Image (cartoon, rainbow, N blue to C red):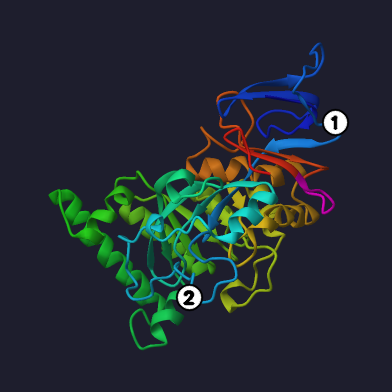
Amino acid sequence: MRIVHAKILPIEGAPIEDGYLRFENGVIQELGDMTGVEEQPGDLDAQGKYLLPGLVDLHTCLGLKEECSRVEGNDFNESSDPLSPQLRALDGFYAGDKAIAMAREAGVTAVVTMPGNMDLIGGQAMAVRLRGETTGEMLLRAPCGMKMALGEEPRAAFGAAGKPPLTRMGQVSMLRALLRRAKKALEAGAGDEKEEALFPVLRGEMPVYFHAHRSDDIEAMVRLAHEFGFRPILVHGADSGKMASFLARENVPVAIGPLTLCNARMESIDLSPALPNALYRAGVRFAITSDHHQSPLYLLAVSAAFAVREGLPVEEALRAVTLSPAEIAGLDAQIGSLRPGKFADMALYSGHPLSYRSRAEHVWIGGEAVL
């Protein structure tokens, strides 16, 4: 199939004002300028519309905390054990979550979804593409990361009941103790289920998505990363603007957001749409996240637009919800930009994708029309 006369935003490479894209068997075959290209029967005429890769969110609880659920579909925080690396998002994901179709209608085609922030180690993340009727059909990679957390939320979940961790010192001590056990088990070649779940982290094969807002928690994250050799991805990072030079030196990427909420906790008081531009100016790798379910996944492009309002260049905002999250998650060989050989995961918008007036009129995932 070919899409013709579209304004193509490939993300990798310059925009094509009047372009075409051809895909077959779920994969992009070619794209380029319409000059000298003859239209053919069956082409989709996209005159005046914008074609770009499907949007990607680096940090969500999609399918684990379901749309409109109370306790019935609330499967994203185990909250019975603060140290649960053996838990898998794969085992709790609900492919029937109504939020999946809502996100797809907004041009979102892939996400990383993972346990929440109440546990010090919540469990293993997974990457999914938003098509299919079963978890297996949607699966892109599992596991694709480990979720850890510091700060107010683990303290609230366990400290309020008089259970450790009661302090930030206790949080880091508990993480360090388990990581040390896992390191010894790795050296011995075997361990219990918690220790063995951490082996890919300690071997550097799997990143850690680390929930942290305050500067002290960000520094603690980096200390642990140095001590145990894992690759951290900072999630949320309300103080990341203050810590931008530090994060750039340490080469720590940031999943920044949500940018569309009131700040509900003291530790997140400085989270704002101005942070993406601060990170960009400091040379920090970053992606913009909705943090679904905290902010609806269908508002991912809106979050990017807010960042543009606060000074982030438009092209960087688009990259922050397409290629950058794919790169940080290690999925960029398959998704995140339009180039031959990548999955035909794309959205065709009625106008510029960051305009509040624009709608995704067509969405394809693996070349299959899902909208």
Which residue is identified by label 2?
A: 153
Q: Residues within 10 Å of mark 2 (few under 14, many from 20)?
A: some
Q: x%, y% of residue 272?
A: 69, 64
Residue 47, numbered circle? 1
Q: x%, y% of residue 42?
A: 74, 23
Residue 256 seen in the current view:
no
In the rendered image, the quadrant that contains the N terminus is: top right
- Residue nearer the viewer, 80 or 97: 97
Question: Regarding mark 2 in the picture, which secondary structure is present there?
Answer: helix
Q: x%, y% of residue 111?
A: 54, 50
Q: CA distance from mark 2 to mark 1?
A: 49 Å
Q: Is residue 362 above or below residue 154?
A: above
Residue 366 in the figure: left or right of residue 147: right
Count of all numbered marks drawn on residues in the image: 2
Q: Is residue 271 above or below residue 309?
A: below
Which span of residues is magenta-colored? 354-360
Q: Amino acid at mark 1?
A: Gln
State the image quarter where residue 164 is shown: bottom left
Residue depth check, mark 2 versus mark 1: number of the one nearer the observer = 1
Residue 96 seen in the current view:
yes
Q: Amino acid at mark 2?
A: Glu
